[in-house]
Image: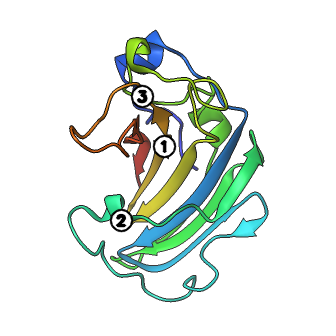
Amino acid sequence: MSTQADTIQPPPETLAVPLRFARHNFEAFCYSTLSCRVIYNDHDFTRDAADKPSPPPPSPDYKSAWPGVLYVGIDNFPAPAKVQWTSLDGVRHATEVDLAKVFKDQLIWHKVPKSDMADFYSGSVAGEPNIYLEVKDRTINVYMEMLIPTKSEQIPGNKLSYGRDDLFLVWTHIY
């Protein structure tokens, strides 16, 4: 069973401008395992590859190419995610990752100062945050990503870059 002591502190901007969420989106990824199964909110996110080896990450910046989330609009928070996997050394693991504890403050992690936040249909945020659970060999990581509309272009000259959707490592544990 994992502990929740592996939580990382949010960026200062998150604490300075606390945005909260009541619903979230979720996706799970497995890399460098001999088998892997992630069940969350009664959904098996890995059923197509549960009993097969998963390859290593495809590139150093693989997280930037993660597809959109599979499961959207989950009310905070169902039962913990159940994770069963076999690491590359052949050791079988089983644990639960309690996202209610990981996100106990229900804060949306971001790096946008209040002075640059633009109003959007949900105030300063655009929908629900994406939560990703990654199993990689002997490590489980939990990430959060959320579009925060901004008043300024994030890429100078790009009129479509009025927003930030930084990916944050929120929790990690090595088994």
Q: Amino acid at mark 3?
A: Thr
Judge depth for marks 2 and 1 and give the one in front: 2
x, y percent for residue 77: 75, 41
Residue that mark 1 sits on: 144
Count neighbours of disc 3 (C-alpha within 10 A) and say few if under 14, some if 14 to 19, many if 20 or more: many
Helix, strand or loop at mark 3: loop
Q: Residue at x 29, y 36 (%)?
A: 154
Residue that mark 3 sits on: 150
Q: Amino acid at mark 2?
A: Ala
Distance from Cα at disc 2 to Cα at disc 1: 15 Å
Residue that mark 2 sits on: 65
x, y percent for residue 138: 38, 62
Q: Quadrant of residue 70?
A: bottom right
Taking 48 as reference, is 163 left or right?
left
Q: Quadrant of residue 110?
A: top left
Q: Tell how many labels.
A: 3
Distance from Cα at disc 1 to Cα at disc 3: 18 Å
x, y percent for residue 123: 63, 24
Helix, strand or loop at mark 2: helix
